[in-house]
Image (spheres, rainbow, N blue to C red):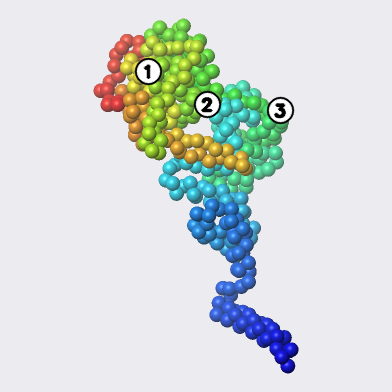
Amino acid sequence: MAAYLPAIRRFVVTLVLLLTGFAGGWVGATVFADGFSITTIVPAIGPGLVANQATPQSLRQQFAVFWEVWNLVDSEFYQRDKIDHTRMIRGAITGMLATLGDQYTVYQEPELAAQTTEHMQGRMGGIGTYLRITDGRAFLYKPIKGAPADAAGLKQDDEIVAIDGEQVAPMIAGLDVNEAAVRVAAKIRGPSGTRVQLTIRRPPDEQVFDITLTRADIVVPSVEAQVLGGGITYIRITEFKANTTPEFDQALRELLPQTSKGMVLDLRNNPGGFLDQARTVLGRLYNGVALYEENSRGELRDIGTIGGDIRAYDVPLVVLVNHGSASASEIVAGALRDARPDVALIGETTFGKGSVQNIYTLSDGSSARITFAHWLTPSRAEIDRVGITPHYVIPYAEDADAQVPCVGERQPPAGATTCADNQLFYAIRLLKTGELPPTMPAAAR
């Protein structure tokens, strides 16, 4: 009998385990009913558990709840076709950065990151036009002169109905205007020499036609320059891009011999760009500190101008700014205000972006922009959320008695030869005659 005792014990233990398992299953099914099933257990210890092992030990407890929700979505969400893991991850990254409360610390998905990089290089493969998204429809906006779209006769406000046969409306349905513009631009852009077919609807008669364009390398200038007459010259920097410095140097070479009275530097609606380009522009106008950089520990580091083989240190200068002047353009305006007492700023208080971001390209082609410091002017004045106040605060107006030569792409009204621009008018008058603008100088420092 003793020989059979071990076998009897094993049988009893096995029976108890089976009964316990059955009882547990019966209780679970009875008590929790439809709210509990084996399918909820497997995901709970599934991908999230494995992924959480790659999380730093000190953060695993905080990340555990993220993976709990991830696995619940994967196992329970009823619209299975709506589950897109890539979009879930990108949405999580976007939300994470948004919690920092810094509008300039942002995530860009691969398509937008690629377009931003192309844009800031000043060169892109495409047909040469900006886009306007309105009411779920895409329109051409400002075709670039001489580019494929312009050469083919496409016009501003032509609607893009389809791209290579794919209808645009369903392509951008439900997207905001920025996402829609990115989606449409990604379809239109491509390597130089390749072709794209557009279906166009043209107002006012709503004629619809197809046109095939050959993409080209589009150079988007960032500097406009011209002679205004009377010894006054004009340079406008639209953005500080990779091609700004050579274009600015070329403009100075052409204009300096004709600049006997002074120069107008127009930074209105310049959203900023590369800091090194702003420093090189400043290096043509003076030699010294361009700005101070303040890090998270409150430490200041002075950053100097970058000189070149062309100088305009002694040229009388008026700088035009407005609420659309931001970031690197504020650095230039503030530096000139502080470092050159002979420079006058005219216009409106600038935007007030005084932070600097490092841009990191991620493994999938997306990018993260992380704010790591703040900028101060050479006199150590704050820019962020404050802006640069010009010496002469003059709101923009197109007064009939403030006529100036038309600059850039502006065209005079029918029958006229000049354009109305009161800010430029007072800048020219100050340089030509020394007459001050009609406002009291504002506190600029």
Q: Note whether 235 is above or below 350 in the view shown.
A: above
Q: Nearer the viewer, residue 50 or 426?
A: 50
Task: Quote the CA–CA distance across marks 2 and 3.
Answer: 24 Å
Q: Residues within 10 Å of mark 1 (few under 14, many from 20)?
A: many
Left or right of 97 on screen, residue 211: right
Tell me where residue 366 appears, x and y as whole percent.
58, 41
Q: Note whether 62 is above or below 30 in the view shown.
A: above
- Which residue is situated farthest in the left direction here? 440
Q: Residue at x 53, y 41 (%)?
A: 368
Q: Residues within 10 Å of mark 3 (few under 14, many from 20)?
A: few
Looking at the image, tell me whether mark 2 or mark 3 is earlier in sequence order.
Answer: 3
Mark 3 — residue?
193
Q: Assign a secondary structure to mark 3.
A: loop
Q: Note whether 207 is above or below 238 in the view shown.
A: below
Q: Residue at x 56, y 30 (%)?
A: 119
Mark 1 — residue?
318
Looking at the image, tell me whether mark 3 or mark 1 is earlier in sequence order.
Answer: 3
Circle 2: residue type: Lys
Which quadrant does the C terminus fall into?
A: top left
Whether residue 48 can be seen here: yes
Tell me where residue 285 appears, x and y as whole percent.
42, 16
Q: Nearer the viewer, mark 2 or mark 3?
A: 2
Q: Residue at x 61, y 73 (%)?
A: 37
Q: Nearer the viewer, residue 33 or 137?
A: 33
Q: Which mark is residue 241?
A: 2
Circle 1: residue type: Val
Left or right of 399 on screen, residue 241: right
Q: Mark 3 and 1 residues: CB-CB less than 8 Å, in contact?
A: no
